Image (cartoon, rainbow, N blue to C red):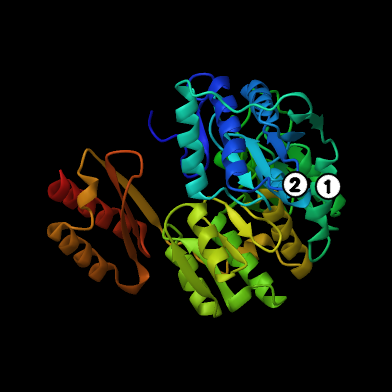
Amino acid sequence: MGRLFGTDGVRGVANADLTAELALGLSVAAAHVLAEAGTFAGHRATAVVGRDPRASGEFLEAAVVAGLASAGVDVLRVGVLPTPAVAHLTGALGADLGVMLSASHNAMPDNGIKFFARGGHKLADELEDRIESVYAEHRTGAPWDRPTGAGVGRVRDYDEGLDQYVAHLVGVLPNRLDGLKIVLDEAHGAASRVSPEAFARAGAELVTIGAVPDGLNINDGCGSTHLDLLKAAVVEHGADLGIAHDGDADRCLAVDHTGAEVDGDQILAVLSLAMRERDALRSDTVVATVMSNLGFKLAMEREGIRFVQTGVGDRYVLEEMKEHGYALGGEQSGHVIILDHATTGDGTLTGLMLAARVAQTGRTLRDLASVMERLPQVLVNVPDVDKSRVTSSAELATAVAEAERELGSTGRVLLRPSGTEPLVRVMVEAADIEQARSVAGRLADSVKSALG
């Protein structure tokens, strides 16, 4: 059995890779590991369990709930809610554990299990490793220590979760959204009820699309991975802006009034200036990954905001933020973390904050996003090479140095080995798209020559 936990929980094709047996076993293992770690000491353990609308989430939720209750954990079943809602409720309700069933932006056949520790924070890597180890041990026949009688967990639906989460979102807004017309694309996902309710309570006039989940249509041609419907709807309805979420609503991308995309880097740029203006941007610092557009870095330097880079993945952004106490971070893909109000990326919160800035300034989103200019970016995947030698090849280092000299201060080169495939990703940014393509092509040839 390969490692089950990836960078964002356990994912796979539901009922093939991610079975009911696996979901039940991991849940029992999680309960035992957290008990051993002292998390449940002195009180009866409680878990919050939520899911996105995928059809497979119904049986996987049942398996998770059964596993936790059989291990003596009381379960608050919150139903279909976004991942950040489950994280928030885990903290707000004082629960010992949170479990979210979702495969985020993946296609409908996939699903996943993500665990949250007390407070709604991501489970530590060492605890995930221990859960996986304990699960493997008992999967081969070692008996569980099972409670009986009054010791088994009790299960109840917690229908107040949606209202509690929406109240939190609206309550942290710096100003209302009255006067704004906004199109929301919910990706037929977990925020289909939450997001429209939050924006409406904040005062916006709404047009909602992609908000009729049937268990099969999540992320299907809509949401943050497919923006065409949102772009058309914003223009058709004469809206001020559009907001798109993914299946579990931990991401947010936007569209301005002309139908042009506003990506995660631009959203971070807008929010950085807004938060600094109200003294909420601690250390005048924003955190993003090495994949952020060079235009974002240049804009932050020009505005006097410090830019800290991390490896690719929102987990690395969050680790950097928590270690140094920074308030804002995120990724180009739309994972934005506002740490004063959320423990993870929260697409609904991000969209609300972005709209609040538009309402507060009276400026268009297009104007606000123009604080940064996205430089042309070309990405080339070079397959079937020895990715382990990316940093040690002298031939490749020479090619990269030549490319960097050619690009100067208005360009950038990044070579990154894939975490899951035998390939190297070549990313080049330049002031001119043709130059970016030319340099990327030459570097891809150099990767093949040096590592093939």
Query: What quarter of the picture does the C terminus occupy?
Result: top left
Q: Name the residue under label 1.
A: 164
Residue under the point 66% across and 75% down = 276
Query: What quarter of the picture does the N terminus occupy?
Result: top left
For residue 356, side relative to residue 387 (left or right) = right
Q: Is residue 307 above or below residue 447?
A: below
Q: Separation of disc 2 and disc 1 at Cα?
A: 8 Å
Q: Name the residue under label 2.
A: 89
The percent position of residue 253, horizontal first and vertical second, equals: 61, 50
Q: Is residue 148 above or below residue 446?
A: above
- Confirm or deny contact between disc 2 and disc 1 (CB under 8 A): yes
SS class, disc 1 = helix
The percent position of residue 117, horizontal first and vertical second, equals: 63, 48
Number of the front mark, 2 or 1: 2
Sequence-first tag of 2 and 1: 2
Residue under the point 52% across and 53% down = 314
Disc 1 crowd rating (10 Å Cα; few below 14, some 14-19, many 20+) is some
The percent position of residue 252, horizontal first and vertical second, equals: 62, 49
Q: Which amino acid does label 2 sit on?
A: Leu
Whether residue 180 is visible, yes or no, is no
Residue 154: which quarter of the image? top right
Closer to the camera, 183 or 249?
249
Residue under the point 69% across and 39% down = 186
Disc 2 crowd rating (10 Å Cα; few below 14, some 14-19, many 20+) is many
